[in-house]
Image: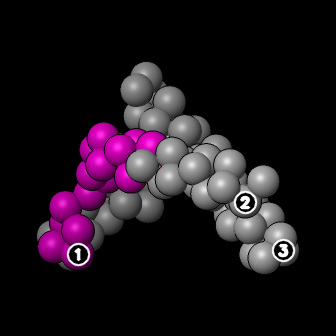
Amino acid sequence: MQTLLVVLLIIVCISLIAVVLLQSGKSAGLSGAIGGGAEQLFGKQKARGMDLILHRATVILSLLFFMIMLLLTYLS
């Protein structure tokens, strides 16, 4: 059981890293917020298309990561 969970955890970790790296940056960092990018940073912009899919995949994979880690901790 633990071996299966560890293999699943590795797959989820690699997938989570890939999904996070595929996402585009939302702002130019601190310089964008100071130089007038605060409207973009605090404005209500909804993700569309691929950004929405990647955002949802990130949330799902991160929840899977934490659930598998808690299960592995409980079993060990």
The tag on residue 2 is 2
Q: Secondary structure at mark 2?
A: helix
- The amino acid marked with disc number 3 is Tyr
State the residue position of label 3. 74
**Res. 61 visible in picture:** yes
The residue sitting at 43% across, 23% down in the picture is 49
Query: Residue at horizontal 61%, vertical 57%?
Result: 6
**2 or 1: mark nearer the eye:** 2
| Alpha carbons under labels 1 and 3: distance apart | 40 Å
Q: Is residue 59 visible?
A: no
| Secondary structure category for the residue under label 3 | helix
Q: Is residue 46 placed above or below 29 in the rendered structure? A: above
Q: Main secondary structure of the magenta part?
A: helix
Name which residue lies at 78% across and 54% down: 1
Q: Residue 66 has which mark? A: none
What is the distance, in whole Å, between disc 2 and disc 1 at their CAs? 43 Å
Task: Name the N-terminal-most of marks 3 and 2.
Answer: 2
Disc 3: CA contacts within 10 A as few (<14), some (14-19) or many (>=20): few
Q: Which residue is depicted at the point 50% across and 30% down?
A: 53
Up/down of 51 relative to 73, above or below? above
Q: In this view of the protein, which residue sits in the foreground, 14 or 26?
A: 14
Q: Residue furthest right?
A: 74
What amino acid is at disc 2?
Answer: Gln
The residue tagged with tag 1: helix, strand or loop? helix
Disc 1 marks which residue?
30
Q: Earlier in the sequence, mark 1 or mark 3?
A: 1
Report if the CB atoms under discs 2 and 1 are less than 8 Å apart.
no
What segment is highlighted magenta in the picture? 15-32
At label 1, which amino acid type do we have?
Leu
Image position, residue 17 (x, y; %) = 38, 52
